[in-house]
Amino acid sequence: MISRKQLLEHAKARQATDIHICAGAPILFRVGGQLLPVTEEKLTAAQSREISLELLTEEQKIKFETNLDYDLMLVDESGRYRINIGYFNGEIGTTIRILPTKPKTIKELFLPDIVKDLTRRTKGLVLITGSTSQGKTTTMASMIDEINSTCKKHIITIEDPIEYVHINKTGIVRQREVGRDTQTFYKGLRAALRQDPDIIAIGEMRDYETIKIALTAAETGVLVFSTLHVISIDKIVERLLSYAPPGDEGQLRFLLAESLQGIIHQELIPTVNGEQIVACEALVVTGAARNVIRRKGGFYLRSIIETGKKYGMNTMAESVNALLEGGIIAEGVAKSVLASYK
């Protein structure tokens, strides 16, 4: 049976982002967004269990058997890995995310100029949005790295887990992991406000209390970055308001209108050489955008993006077509992505 070391080294050599260990299937690597089998034989339940449990200490195995799910970070000489082990139809399986060793720069990610411009704001909220596994954390890490490299700022991150490790450059970055360094996003954020931050980066806004205190911090002089799962910028207002209890929607809408600086909405799409690249649309919050957020639904933000080129805004169509014209993506990929933005 393949050892843990062999499995991880093989995955990194194939430039995989994830490893799937599942009874009744071969070992699968996600490469360029696609799941590819890397063993000829399907794993038996015993093999899947053996490979999975090899990743745990004896103490962790006890916790796993009690909770039936277990998340952990693995750091060894070969790199850093985020691991989830769980039961699936009565059998043990594992998903391993291979984490980069350092953040990529905004330039390396081919992100538009507006992304760098948003890092120069001194207060307010900047959101990076998209569906699951669309590179939101990678984009946020590149923005933190840009500030860390160019400004004497104090940056505090609250993450679950820490995916990119930042080293102090021109500024200082203090990273806190939920469950290890702080109990929850909300408690970590409350504490961060007493730690003299210039920038706070929240791995994900998951509940109303976190959203509300993040917006309050952004309104009172801190630059806040966060990610949010949403399928399009059109849905951002409704998505955030859905977290608010009855009667608080108006206050949340007001805070959002006052503090929001911009939104980067992105998708990871396959390139012609089998890799992946970010296509994104960008909203800069102007006076017109604030009025929409205060009074209307997010649908009207679409027209603001389409007419906001002078502010640095761009549509998803413009981003995708630029990649197509540059020969980076295929025409079929472009059509598939843009079908959702009509």
Image (cartoon, grey):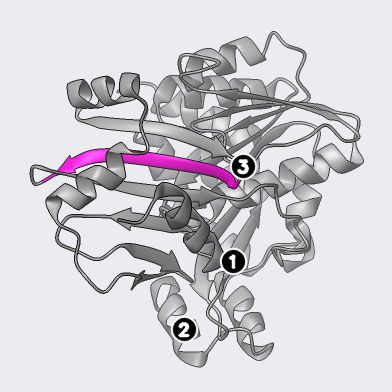
Q: Relative to residue 208, is residue 154 drawn left or right? A: right
The type of residue carrying mark 1 is Val
Q: From the top left corner, tell me how far across and down residue 312 is, in percent.
A: 75, 62
The mark that comes first in sequence, 2 or 3, is 3
Foreground residue among 141 and 238: 141
The magenta region covers 78-88
Task: Tell me the element at label 2.
Answer: helix
Residue 75 versus residue 342 in the image, above or below: above
**In the rendered image, the vertical position of residue 298 relative to residue 72, given as above or below:** below
Amino acid, disc 2: Val
User: Decide: marks 2, 1 in contact (CB < 8 A)?
Assistant: no
Q: In the rendered structure, does residue 18 fall within the stretch colored magenta?
A: no
Q: Earlier in the sequence, mark 2 or mark 1?
A: 1
x and y, in percent, of residue 216 in the image: 60, 21
Residue shown at 21%/24% (left/top)? 67
Q: Residue at x 33, y 39 (%)?
A: 54
Residue at 19%, 20% (x, y): give it: 66
Q: Which mark is residue 278?
A: 1
Residue at the disc numbered 2: 333
